[in-house]
């Protein structure tokens, strides 16, 4: 099989870095998108013998012109695109809903939702035009796409919207063999979840330490989701720390 080509957004840290490294280890060519080129180059260096198959691209996914330029680089280098992992995202500090600044809301919507739309659209266009036609788009939904935490309205709202985007992509992509799925991740151990070791606010107002899982589980899950041929699709996958209080949250 010819080398598969992937784009991973938010590839400089955490889930994005782990997934990019898993894809590189699986033989993919991977474009690493993120705001900070230094972090992306560090991800590339961690790939070892596979580093030559990585392409770091500094891009703010909330900016249409930046996304267009980034995907143009991908097409120029490899000529096709098989997988987009829409992962880049922001969260707001846990502040009371009534105290959340409007500009913080708009910043999170711009990256989490608009950024996912822009990258999906750019990938969709490449996948539609290439031969053979088609590809796979996987959106990072988070378990907040199902059940919110307290004081998380912007993040939760965008993740619920990601589910709608995933469904629309799945429907609109059928005629081009473009499939879409969503991975909902709970408590992967990353810099974003370090605070969980100090305690996280629960629905009843108490604060409790929550278990986490090795972030590399997510990278392996993405590789598995894309191991299927385009006649099959894992539409949703929930992967979470086994002992985190998700099933009984609230």
Image: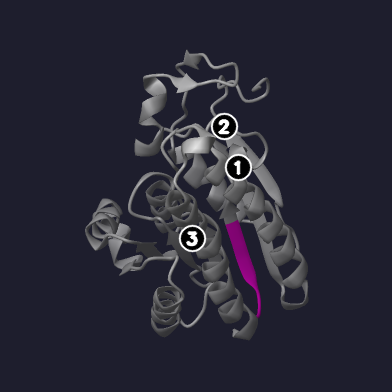
Vertical relation: 132 (above or below) 139 = below
State the residue in front, 213 or 155.
155
- Can see residue 229? no
Question: Circle 3 sits on which residue?
Answer: 110
In the rendered image, is residue 172 in sight?
yes
Local packing at callout 1 (Cα closer than 10 Å; few below 14, some 14-19, many 20+) is: many
The span from disc 1 to disc 2 (Cα, nearest Å) is 8 Å
Q: Secondary structure at mark 3?
A: helix
What residue does disc 1 label?
184
Left/right of residue 247 with respect to residue 214 in the rendered view: right
| Placement of the N terminus among the 4 image quadrants | bottom right
Location of mark 2 (residue): 240
The label nearer to you, 3 versus 1, is: 3
Precedes in sequence: disc 1 or disc 2: 1
Q: Which residues make up the magenta segment?
A: 132-138
Q: Position of residue 122 (x, y in %)?
A: 54, 76
Task: Tell me the SS state at disc 2.
Answer: strand
**N-terminal of the two: label 3 or label 1?**
3
For the point 69% across and 47% down, the residue is: 236
Q: Badge 2: few (under 14), some or many (20 or more) residues near its Cα, within 10 Å?
A: many
Judge whether residue 166 is colored magenta. Answer: no
| Tags 3 and 1 touching, CB below 8 Å | no
How far separated are the C-alphas under marks 3 and 2?
26 Å
Q: Earlier in the sequence, mark 3 or mark 2?
A: 3
Looking at the rendering, in which quadrant would you find the C terminus? top right
């Amino acid at each position: 099989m010819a080398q598969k080509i992937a784009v991973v957004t938010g590839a400089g840290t955490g889930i994005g870095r782990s997934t990019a490294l898993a894809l590189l280890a699986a033989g993919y060519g991977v474009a690493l998108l993120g705001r900070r080129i230094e972090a992306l180059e560090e991800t590339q260096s961690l790939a070892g013998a596979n580093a030559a198959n990585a392409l770091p691209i500094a891009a703010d996914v909330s900016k249409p012109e930046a996304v267009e330029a980034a995907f143009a680089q991908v097409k120029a280098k490899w000529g096709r695109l098989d997988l987009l992992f829409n992962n880049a995202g922001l969260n707001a500090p846990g502040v009371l809903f009534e105290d959340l600044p409007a500009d913080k809301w708009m910043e999170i919507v711009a990256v989490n939702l608009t950024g996912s739309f822009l990258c999906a659209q750019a990938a969709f266009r490449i996948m539609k035009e290439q031969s053979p036609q088609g590809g796979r788009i996987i959106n990072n939904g988070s378990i907040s796409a199902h059940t919110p935490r307290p004081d998380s309205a912007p993040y939760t709202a965008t993740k619920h919207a990601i589910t709608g985007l995933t469904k629309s992509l799945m429907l609109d992509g059928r005629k081009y063999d473009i499939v879409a799925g969503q991975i909902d991740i709970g408590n992967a151990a990353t810099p974003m979840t370090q605070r969980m070791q100090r305690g996280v606010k629960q629905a009843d107002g108490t604060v409790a330490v929550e278990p986490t899982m090795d972030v590399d589980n997510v990278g392996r899950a993405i590789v598995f989701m894309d191991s299927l041929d385009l006649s099959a699709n894992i539409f949703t996958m929930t992967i979470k720390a086994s002992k985190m209080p998700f099933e009984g949250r609230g």
